[in-house]
Amino acid sequence: MRQKICALVLALVMALTSAGPAFAAEPPNAVQSKLSLIEQDTYGREQTGALIDRINRLERDYDGKHRGGSLMARIDAIYEEVYTNSASPSVLMDLNAIEWNINHETSMRSVQERVGELETALLGKTSEGTFKKRIAALSTASFGRAEIPVTPVSVPANTLIKIALVTPVNAKNLKVGDTIEYQIADDVFVNDVLVFTKGSRGEGSVTKVRQARNFGRNAEVQIDFKETKALDGTYVTTYIGEEAKKEMEHLAMAAGASLAGIVVLGPIGVVAGAFVHGKNVDLPAGTELYIQTQHETTLFGVQTTYDSAAPFQRDAAPIPIKADSTNDQSVYNDAA
């Protein structure tokens, strides 16, 4: 109950101080930043050493051999393989689908950790070989086939996503530029297609902090909930809009929040008096709240009828997939 009431705190504070919707993040272009992103998702942290050695390791771990071409071309090829969905699902899409099929949630850990843990859970031991081969074996064990049954679907704008804070939000401890991590608290389906999974991560950024002051002036924390990762690995632009605010108000009323609690969190100056100190914004990790998608977005999801954990089932017509053989830049045939 305390966490739900705290969610109202953020809802009403954000109603006055929420940053404007952000544009979707573009994939990194620089060699170093793109390589760093792949390494963080693959191994859990950025690696050290010469660039060529780091690229060689990624190619070996994913494909079993090295590509030719420039450093940027090789990094781009790995990036396409890990993140891009077109004629076939990306590595992350496959892994997320397998993990959800087993645990009904996805984790925030690295590809390396997740593959090993899923092998132990499904097969009783870890395996050898490239990540792609091992993921294909996990898919066969989980879905009965090496290829994940995915389908593209149009996710409407303003689709609600229930999230839980990973990083505590306390006005006394935050500064502008701090990162606020959160994870999805419930699965989100569109026409029985799973598009956001419980456990998937997102990041926000603190854009303004003001401490509580006298005359009942409450603390203020402004957060840009700029992007949330979907099942297919796409970062979708998200923010606290009107639909999200309404859901948080309903959540607070269901928890029995008092009118006094709501008034305290209202506009500056609701509580008057020189000796009345304003309220601090203090939301612990695990506090649940809502965000929503900003734009209609086409995502790849897994067709399923498992929707008992998803309070938000949206209707949208699935989009026919277009084959694009140019997307697969791998030089290694895992089926061989």
Image (cartoon, rainbow, N blue to C red):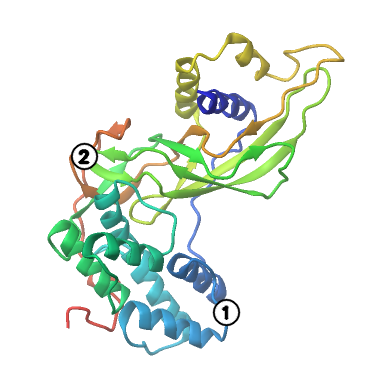
Residue at 45% in and 19% down: 250
Looking at the figure, which quarter contains the C terminus?
Answer: bottom left
* Residue situated furthest right in the rendering: 274
Please state if 330 lies on the left or on the right of 268 as rendered. Answer: left
The kind of residue on which mark 1 rests is: Thr
SS for tag 1? Answer: loop
Q: Residues under labels 1 and 2: Cα distance?
A: 42 Å
SS for tag 2? Answer: loop
The kind of residue on which mark 2 rests is: Tyr
Position of 28 relative to 230 (above/below): below
Q: Position of residue 256 (x, y in %)?
A: 50, 13
Pointer 1 residue = 48
Quarter of the rendering containing residue 222: top right
Mark 1 Cα shell of 10 Å, populated few (<14), some (14-19), many (≥20): few
Pointer 2 residue = 306
Query: Closest to the observer: 297 or 193?
Result: 193
Q: Position of residue 313 (x, y in %)?
A: 28, 33
Please state if 12 lies on the left or on the right of 103 as rendered. Answer: right
Residue 319 visible here: yes
Mark 2 Cα shell of 10 Å, populated few (<14), some (14-19), many (≥20): some
